[in-house]
Image (cartoon, rainbow, N blue to C red):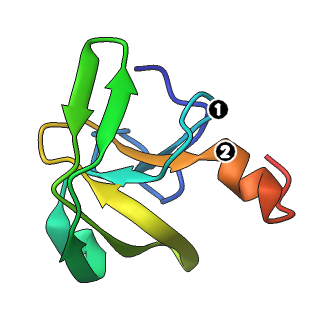
């Protein structure tokens, strides 16, 4: 995956930070500890490799940015911020 930008200060881009993705319609983390008050949530997500399912949803934080309804998909390789959701909230991306 080629990221538009990272929302942290990881200069080596080692997939530990959040990647802003213009194609994603949801925020996704691969680490349940990123979610506050996670709740069980099995939701299908379409990827280039096919359909995969989330295990949980909750609120995540990326360097002070609050990501509501973020999904946890443990097998995902990146943590993704939906650029479209940011634009809907009035952010410039």
Residue in the image at 34% along x and 74% along y: 58
What label does residue 83 carry, if any? 2
Quarter where residue 31 is shown? bottom left
The correct choice, above or below, for 86 with respect to 46 in the image is below
Residue 17 seen by the camera: no
Residue in the image at 26% along x and 23% along y: 51
Is residue 84 toward the left or the right of residue 6 in the image?
A: right
- Residues under numbered marks 2 and 1 in contact, where contact means CB atoms less than 8 Å apart: yes
**Disc 1, SS:** loop
**Disc 2, SS:** helix
Q: Quadrant of the image for the N terminus?
A: top left
Considering depth in this image, is 27 or 18 the residue closer to the camera?
A: 27
Residue in the image at 33% along x and 57% along y: 71
State the image coordinates of residue 9 (x, y, percent, origin top left): 47, 58
Cα distance in 3D space between marks 2 and 1? 5 Å
What label does residue 22 carry, if any? 1
Mark 1 or mark 2, which is nearer the start of the sequence?
Answer: 1
The correct choice, above or below, for 23 with respect to 54 in the image is above
Is residue 84 toward the left or the right of residue 34 in the image?
A: right
């Amino acid at each position: 995956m080629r990221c538009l930008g990272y929302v942290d200060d990881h200069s080596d881009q080692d997939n530990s930070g959040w990647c802003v993705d213009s194609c994603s319609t949801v925020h996704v983390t691969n680490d349940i500890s990123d979610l506050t008050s996670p709740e069980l949530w099995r939701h299908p997500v379409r990827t280039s490799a096919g359909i995969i399912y989330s295990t949980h949803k909750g609120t995540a934080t990326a360097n002070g940015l609050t990501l509501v309804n973020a999904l946890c998909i443990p097998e995902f390789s990146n943590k993704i911020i939906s650029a479209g959701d940011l634009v809907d909230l009035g952010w410039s991306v």
